[in-house]
Amino acid sequence: MKKLTCLAVLLMGYLGAFAQDVEMADTMRSEGKIYVVIGTIVIVFVGLALYLFSMDRRLNRIEKHKD
Protein backbone atom coordinates (compact mmCIF):
# COMPACT_ATOMS: atom_id res chain seq x y z
CA MET A 1 0.00 0.00 0.00
CA LYS A 2 2.90 2.31 0.78
CA LYS A 3 4.37 1.82 -2.69
CA LEU A 4 1.06 2.59 -4.35
CA THR A 5 0.67 5.80 -2.37
CA CYS A 6 4.20 6.86 -3.23
CA LEU A 7 3.58 6.14 -6.90
CA ALA A 8 0.36 8.18 -6.86
CA VAL A 9 2.14 11.16 -5.26
CA LEU A 10 4.96 11.02 -7.80
CA LEU A 11 2.52 10.84 -10.71
CA MET A 12 0.59 13.83 -9.38
CA GLY A 13 3.82 15.82 -9.14
CA TYR A 14 4.77 14.83 -12.67
CA LEU A 15 1.40 15.82 -14.09
CA GLY A 16 1.57 19.17 -12.33
CA ALA A 17 5.00 19.90 -13.76
CA PHE A 18 3.93 18.73 -17.21
CA ALA A 19 0.93 21.05 -17.29
CA GLN A 20 2.98 24.21 -16.67
CA ASP A 21 3.90 26.50 -19.56
CA VAL A 22 7.65 27.07 -19.41
CA GLU A 23 8.74 30.35 -20.95
CA MET A 24 12.42 29.38 -21.09
CA ALA A 25 11.67 26.30 -23.20
CA ASP A 26 9.63 28.39 -25.63
CA THR A 27 12.48 30.87 -25.99
CA MET A 28 15.05 28.14 -26.54
CA ARG A 29 12.81 26.43 -29.07
CA SER A 30 12.28 29.64 -31.03
CA GLU A 31 16.04 30.32 -31.12
CA GLY A 32 16.90 26.73 -32.07
CA LYS A 33 18.94 26.14 -28.90
CA ILE A 34 16.61 23.42 -27.63
CA TYR A 35 18.24 21.01 -30.09
CA VAL A 36 21.61 21.60 -28.43
CA VAL A 37 20.08 20.76 -25.05
CA ILE A 38 18.40 17.64 -26.40
CA GLY A 39 21.59 16.58 -28.15
CA THR A 40 23.59 16.99 -24.95
CA ILE A 41 21.08 14.95 -22.96
CA VAL A 42 21.14 12.19 -25.61
CA ILE A 43 24.96 12.10 -25.58
CA VAL A 44 25.02 11.82 -21.77
CA PHE A 45 22.43 9.01 -21.74
CA VAL A 46 24.18 7.09 -24.52
CA GLY A 47 27.48 7.44 -22.66
CA LEU A 48 25.93 6.14 -19.46
CA ALA A 49 24.29 3.24 -21.28
CA LEU A 50 27.57 2.24 -22.96
CA TYR A 51 29.39 2.46 -19.63
CA LEU A 52 26.80 0.27 -17.89
CA PHE A 53 26.82 -2.34 -20.67
CA SER A 54 30.62 -2.53 -20.64
CA MET A 55 30.62 -2.80 -16.84
CA ASP A 56 28.04 -5.60 -17.03
CA ARG A 57 30.19 -7.52 -19.52
CA ARG A 58 33.26 -7.14 -17.32
CA LEU A 59 31.37 -8.37 -14.26
CA ASN A 60 30.02 -11.36 -16.19
CA ARG A 61 33.55 -12.29 -17.26
CA ILE A 62 34.79 -12.01 -13.67
CA GLU A 63 31.92 -14.17 -12.40
CA LYS A 64 32.58 -16.84 -15.02
CA HIS A 65 36.31 -16.77 -14.26
CA LYS A 66 35.65 -17.46 -10.53
CA ASP A 67 33.68 -20.64 -11.30
Image (cartoon, helix red, strand yellow):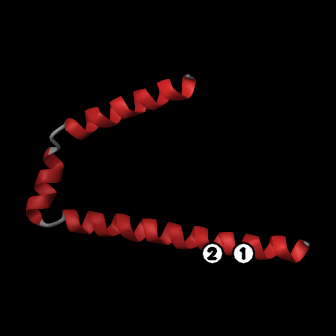
Label 1 packing within 10 angstroms: few (<14), some (14-19), many (20+): few
Q: Which residue in the structure is indicated by mark 1?
A: 58
Three-letter amino acid code at the position of disc 2: Ser
In x, y percent, where is residue 2?
Answer: 56, 23
Does 18 appear above or below 2? below
Mark 1 falls on what kind of element? helix
Residue 3 - label: none
Does 66 appear above or below 1? below
Q: Nearer the viewer, residue 6 or 51?
A: 6
In x, y percent, where is residue 60?
Answer: 75, 72
- Asked if marks 2 and 1 touch (Cβ < 8 Å), the reply is yes
Q: Decide if residue 45 is on the left or right side of residue 38.
A: right
Residue 14 occupies which quadrant of the picture? top left
In x, y percent, where is residue 23?
Answer: 13, 45
Three-letter amino acid code at the position of disc 1: Arg
Q: Decide if residue 48 is on the left or right side of residue 8.
A: right
Which residue appears at 41% of the width and 27% of the height? 9
Q: How many marks?
A: 2
Residue 56 occupies which quadrant of the picture? bottom right
Label 2 packing within 10 angstroms: few (<14), some (14-19), many (20+): few
Mark 2 falls on what kind of element? helix
Which residue appears at 51% of the width and 67% of the height? 48
Q: Which residue in the structure is indicated by mark 2?
A: 54
Considering every residue shown, the one lying at the far right of the view is 67
Q: Which quadrant of the figure contains the C terminus?
A: bottom right
Measure the C-alpha gap from mark 2 to mark 1: 6 Å
